[in-house]
Image (cartoon, rainbow, N blue to C red):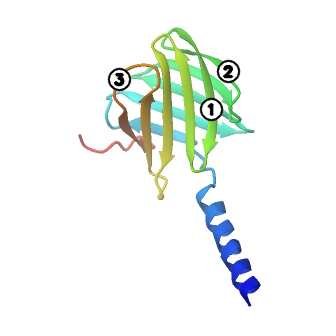
Amino acid sequence: MRLFFLTIFFSASFSLFAQTSSQPDVSGTWVSENHDNVTWILTQKDDALHVVEMTGEKPSADFTCPLNGQPCDVKIAGHSEKMMVYFNGDRLVEILEGHSGVTKRRLTVSADGKVLTVEVVPLSAQDKSEKTLFHRGGAAGSH
């Protein structure tokens, strides 16, 4: 009888873990709520993430990185930088090493798929963490 309960417990635990560690599809057009005129166009395909960052009508970044944590070279706002992108459970993590230090961004998609929360954590400076909300498809909320 104890084996039966242990089997049920571990099956339920594994099922819960599998559900919480699913990798969301972050693909879409995301408009920043906190920074006017910033739009991200993310395309997740074939174990890679293609990123186009727009500031107004002008692209400030356009790059593709593998989703396995391998470093890739990117150019953001005219600066050459290194980036690693990988999933940690239901969060997409980006580690960016560039001219202003090392920064980690954690991207989380809301349950309804309409909001992308981006937490920015500086790893090499005394700067404070910040959060930015992006809304899918250009419907930014009021400020």
Secondary element at image label 3: loop
Task: Give residue 75's mark.
Answer: none
Give amino acid for label 2: Cys
Give amino acid for label 1: Val
Earlier sequence position, callout 2 versus callout 1: 2
Which residue occupies the extreme bottom position in the image? Answer: 1
Q: Residue at x 49, y 33 (%)?
A: 105
Earlier sequence position, callout 3 versus callout 2: 2
Q: Residue at x 42, y 37 (%)?
A: 119
Which residue occupies the extreme front position in the image? Answer: 2
Badge 2 is on which residue? 72
Q: Is mark 3 in CB contact (under 8 Å) with mark 2?
A: no
Residue 68 horizontal side relative to residue 136, left or right: right
| In this view, 143 is above or below 104 | below
Q: Is mark 3 in CB contact (under 8 Å) with mark 1?
A: no
Q: Nearer the viewer, residue 94 or 116?
A: 94
Q: Nearer the viewer, residue 40 or 105?
A: 105
Q: Is mark 2 in CB contact (under 8 Å) with mark 1?
A: yes
Crowdedness near tag 3: few (<14), some (14–19) or many (≥20) residues, C-alpha within 10 Å: few
What is the C-alpha distance between the residues marked 3 and 2? 25 Å
Q: Residue at x 64, y 37 (%)?
A: 86
Badge 3 is on which residue? 127
Q: Residue at x 63, y 50 (%)?
A: 23
Secondary element at image label 2: strand
Give amino acid for label 3: Asp
Crowdedness near tag 2: few (<14), some (14–19) or many (≥20) residues, C-alpha within 10 Å: some
Task: Give residue 85's mark.
Answer: 1
What is the C-alpha distance between the residues marked 2 and 1? 9 Å
Q: Position of residue 83 (x, y in %)?
A: 60, 23
